[in-house]
Image (spheres, grey):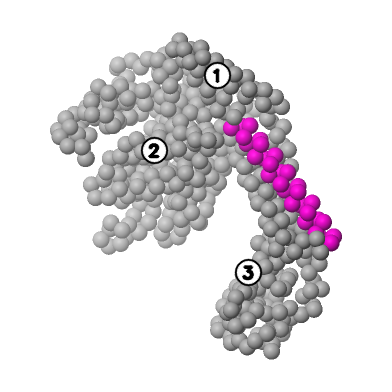
């Protein structure tokens, strides 16, 4: 029995083992199998080979399956149900060898790209890496290394040891994936020459192994390339991310909660350790402010926290149909994001800020915590007048402790800004603080009337707003790092001329 929806339908190549009934017609996407690896892998699971992408042709095995066929221009599809699978004719079997050769060529090309990236990255790793790690481990193992008068050296050596151990683990992972991919490719080539060597299931497993090795090599290799751009003086330090509600009232408080969730998920995805330092709940929902601490992940997780997140500093603008608007009208709201490195006390001791440049205010913390936070002025806000930089601390129950902590954070932020602006003295810092309101945003999040997230600095954009708000920020941050590196190279070239 055959069904002909069109004279050019692929279904004319198939024989139905049992009866079926047509259920619906609908548009369907068209892609050739030669550019769709997942389609070819999928085809090996069934008793036929299709020369076309599974977006065009699909069958599910079991007691009751679904069959889709569509014309060669991909205009329509017919869905039919059957109690048994479809069988192929000799015409499809004749195409199997051509299909497998094309599939193997695609896998080889993909793996070659991964190997080229692997070899390029390997050139940047010291050849004596193992000796470097051994020397640092020997120094750390010395009992006198942990003496109190050796703190500066302790901090430097332990950070270097962590850095080179991570690099060593990364190199070992790359090499392992490359060797596994080589082995899988060799066996696939042998299977292509002699189809009796491996069963279809084994060939499928080898293809998946090769594709997975290629994916890991490319993904981790690209991430390593990005980390090479994080060469700032404090890029490898932990960082604090302060989220503050801007213009927008309750909507702005809810926007801060969304940003908090976004950064939490992104940190988890990238392997960073994130903890909540402070939260100031909003009057209705969300937060007036949230302070996050991001550190390198345990066991070789995310590295260079400050370098990775510092580009998030600025105003983030949201446009959507507000759930807090009685008329369900579109509303624009803002939130400010500030990022500062978490520096050691030794880095801050030499920084002196004149009292005349500071405005210190004590206030009540507010929120949960009893009388101490609601009746005692334990919270402290310090404003650096020349730059307009504000730091507020409410974590501790003592005003003196909050003042000391706020001063350290202010110094860390000023030191980082001084490096960015390439000034020798804190007093030379230009004011770069902006209000989280109209005309100051670095990124727009448009959820209505259309869906689009666009970074104003690079032009990078995506319409997949849900994935982005779920923490998929890697492409956007990577684009900013590349843009900044390019601008720095151009500036350096102009200076040399």
**x then y, percent, for residue 217:** 66, 44
Task: Please report whichever mark, 3 or 1, sits nearer to the chain's N-terminal start.
Answer: 3
Residue in view at x 47 percent, y 42 percent:
267
Q: Residue at x 30, y 39 (%)?
A: 279
Q: Is residue 376 magenta?
A: no
Is residue 233 toward the left or the right of residue 58 in the image?
left
Query: Relative to 327, is 207 on the left or the right?
Result: right
Residue 310 seen by the camera: no
Q: Quadrant of residue 206?
A: bottom right
Query: What residue is pinned by disc 1?
Result: 141
The residue that label 3 is drawn on is 55
Residue at the right extreme?
193
Which residue of the protein is positioned furthest toward the top in this rendering?
Answer: 149
Work out how far the residue at label 2 is from the one at label 3, CA to CA, in angstroms.
43 Å
Location of residue 455 with respect to 27 vertically, above or below = above
Q: Which residues are magenta?
A: 166-194
Q: Which residue is mark 2?
A: 275
User: 450 above or below 236?
Assistant: below
Q: Position of residue 284 (x, y in %)?
A: 24, 50
Number of marks present in the image shown: 3
Kind of element beneath mark 1: helix
Where residue 149 is drawn, which disc sits there? none
Quadrant assignment for the N terminus: bottom right
- The verdict on residue 173 being magenta is yes
Report the quarter where the C terminus lies. Answer: top right
Q: CA distance from mark 1 to mark 2?
A: 31 Å
- Within-10-Å neighbours for mark 1: few <14, some 14–19, many 20+: few
């Amino acid at each position: 029995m055959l069904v002909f929806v069109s004279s050019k339908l692929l279904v004319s190549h198939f024989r139905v083992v049992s009866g079926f009934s047509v259920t619906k017609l609908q548009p369907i996407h068209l892609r050739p199998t030669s550019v769709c690896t997942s389609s070819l892998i999928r085809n090996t699971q069934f008793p036929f080979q299709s020369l076309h992408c599974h977006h065009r042709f699909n069958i599910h095995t079991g007691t009751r399956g679904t069959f889709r066929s569509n014309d060669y221009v991909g205009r329509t599809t017919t869905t039919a149900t059957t109690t048994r699978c479809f069988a192929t004719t000799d015409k499809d079997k004749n195409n199997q060898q051509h299909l497998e050769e094309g599939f193997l060529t695609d896998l080889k090309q993909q793996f070659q790209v991964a190997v080229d990236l692997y070899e390029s990255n390997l050139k940047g790793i010291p050849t004596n890496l193992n000796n470097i790690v051994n020397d640092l481990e020997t120094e750390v193992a010395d009992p006198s290394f942990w003496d109190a008068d050796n703190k500066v050296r302790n901090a430097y050596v332990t950070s270097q040891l962590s850095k080179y151990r991570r690099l060593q683990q990364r190199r070992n992972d790359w090499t392992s994936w490359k060797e596994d991919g080589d082995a899988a490719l060799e066996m696939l080539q042998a299977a292509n020459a002699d189809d009796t060597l491996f069963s279809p299931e084994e060939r499928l497993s080898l293809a998946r192994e090769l594709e997975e090795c290629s994916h890991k090599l490319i993904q981790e290799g690209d991430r390593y390339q990005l980390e090479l751009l994080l060469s700032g003086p404090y890029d490898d330090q932990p960082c604090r991310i302060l989220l503050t509600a801007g213009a927008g009232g309750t909507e702005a408080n809810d926007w801060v909660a969304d940003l908090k969730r976004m950064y939490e998920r992104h940190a988890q995805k990238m392997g960073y350790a994130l903890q909540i330092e402070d939260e100031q709940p909003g009057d209705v929902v969300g937060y007036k402010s949230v302070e996050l601490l991001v550190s390198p992940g345990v066991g070789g997780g995310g590295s260079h926290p400050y370098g990775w997140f510092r580009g998030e500093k600025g105003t983030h603008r949201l446009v959507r149909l507000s759930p807090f608007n009685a008329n369900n009208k579109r509303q624009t709201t803002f939130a400010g994001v500030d990022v500062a490195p978490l520096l050691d006390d030794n880095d801050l001791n030499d920084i002196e800020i004149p009292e005349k440049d500071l405005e210190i205010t004590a206030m009540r913390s507010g929120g949960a915590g009893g009388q101490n936070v609601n009746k005692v002025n334990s919270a402290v806000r310090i404003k650096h007048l020349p730059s307009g930089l504000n730091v507020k601390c409410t974590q501790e129950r003592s005003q003196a402790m909050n003042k000391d902590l706020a001063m350290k954070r202010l110094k860390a932020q000023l030191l980082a800004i001084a490096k960015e602006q390439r000034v020798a003295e804190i007093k030379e810092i230009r004011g770069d603080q902006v209000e989280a309101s109209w005309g100051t945003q670095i990124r727009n999040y448009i959820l209505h009337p259309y869906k689009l997230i666009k970074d104003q600095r690079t032009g990078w954009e995506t319409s997949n707003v849900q994935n982005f708000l779920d923490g998929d920020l890697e492409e956007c941050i990577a684009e900013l790092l590349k843009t900044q590196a390019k601008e720095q190279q151009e500036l350096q070239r102009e200076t040399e001329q």
